[in-house]
Amino acid sequence: MEELLTAEERTVRDRVRAFCDAEVRPIINEYWERAEFPRSVVAGLAELGVAGGELEGHGCPGLSAIANGLVAMELARCDGSVSTFHGVHSGLAMHSIGLCGSEEQKARWLPDMALLAKIGAFALTEPEHGSDVVALETRARRSGDGYVLDGVKRWIGNASFADLVIVWARDDEGKVGAFVVEGGTAVEGFEAEVITGKVAKRAALQSQVTLTEVRVPAENRLAEAHSFEAAAKVLTHCRPTVAWGALGHAQAAYEIAFAYTSRRSQFGKPLAGHQLVQYRLAKMLAELTGMQLICLRLSQLAQQERVTPAMAALAKMHCAEKGRFVVSEARDLMGGNGLLLDYNVARHMGDIEVVSTVEGTDTMQALILGREITGIAAFG
């Protein structure tokens, strides 16, 4: 894949990798164990100039789809929690505004978000509506010159400290819209309770959000979000970076396992000198290569604005599944040491499970793809 990248794309990748190696990798395990987000890395992330990804104008970097994918890959290769923070802010929140907002709304919010001076969150999933989130129950009732939001959201990344929260809700006519709650937990009626007890992405703070008569000005309703198709558009646009993230986790696990089996000796020679270990490394590399090519091709199509929901679903489904395989093999090759945070693979093993679920489970991706294949919707 290397020789298919432009010099600019390699530069973006290498810059993110250097940041991760210098500022994230040395501290992340202690934050993971404490289930605390490392706020100290936000300034360094801002300096990378990658927030907003492919969005152009209003201070956004206008990266190529491939460069944006490489950013997701490198962040996940280092740590899934920091990758999640970036994916929620740069991907879901900023692209909700970038794809569904008016020019005035983009100009109002995107510049500060591109600098990470204001952090974004994306509130779609609800306690009773995950895969069938199209049935969302959160309501936006018209009141005077604005709206009043009532409902509950769950698994909302960044919500406990975000400055802007994109809340998806139904209006009085039953239409789904996106409403920007400015101020987050400082707003009366907005409560974000961090979910505890997670065994994966522990340093990513995800919350259950309760909205009780939260008032939002009419101008904070995103101008181009009139139905659930707007939310689906954002998810489809961001889904390729989830596939790239799965690739990052798998790449990290492969590299760690290869280094470990090369230096650890058993039965008089390095583990990597045993036939079964070489067979497993070869299978892992083959799956990694397939993941790379799918991610690269999907991003090429994204640059041509030719990605369909089925294409994005196929990439996310395949890469999450193969990523789980590679990380699991890496953990097993390292024996008991593979379970220790010091060796890092255990963290990736938990995080790849989240990747398999986030932004649509593998089952839901298969059903999207199945509908494309057969012409028959089988979601019920």
Image (tube, helix red, strand yellow):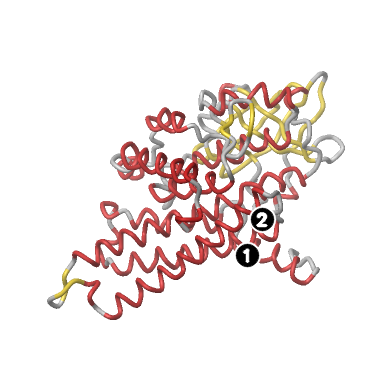
The residue that disc 2 covers is 131
Q: Position of residue 123 (x, y in %)?
A: 63, 39
Q: Which amino acid lies under the numbered mark 1 shown in the image of this protein?
A: Thr
Determine whether, in the image, residue 359 is placed left or right of residue 320.
right
Could you tell me which secondary element the residue under label 1 belongs to?
helix
CA gap, disc 2 and disc 1: 9 Å
Please tell me which residue lies in front, 214 or 25.
Answer: 25
Q: Position of residue 52 (x, y in %)?
A: 58, 35
Q: Which amino acid lies under the numbered mark 2 shown in the image of this protein?
A: Ser
Please tell me which residue lies in front, 77 or 185.
Answer: 77
Could you tell me which secondary element the residue under label 2 belongs to?
loop
Q: Quadrant of the C terminus?
A: bottom right
Which-is-in-front pick, marks 2 and 1?
A: 1
Disc on res. 363: 1
Residue at 27% over, 68% down: 335
Quarter holding residue 2: bottom left
Please tell me which residue lies in front, 306 or 320.
Answer: 306
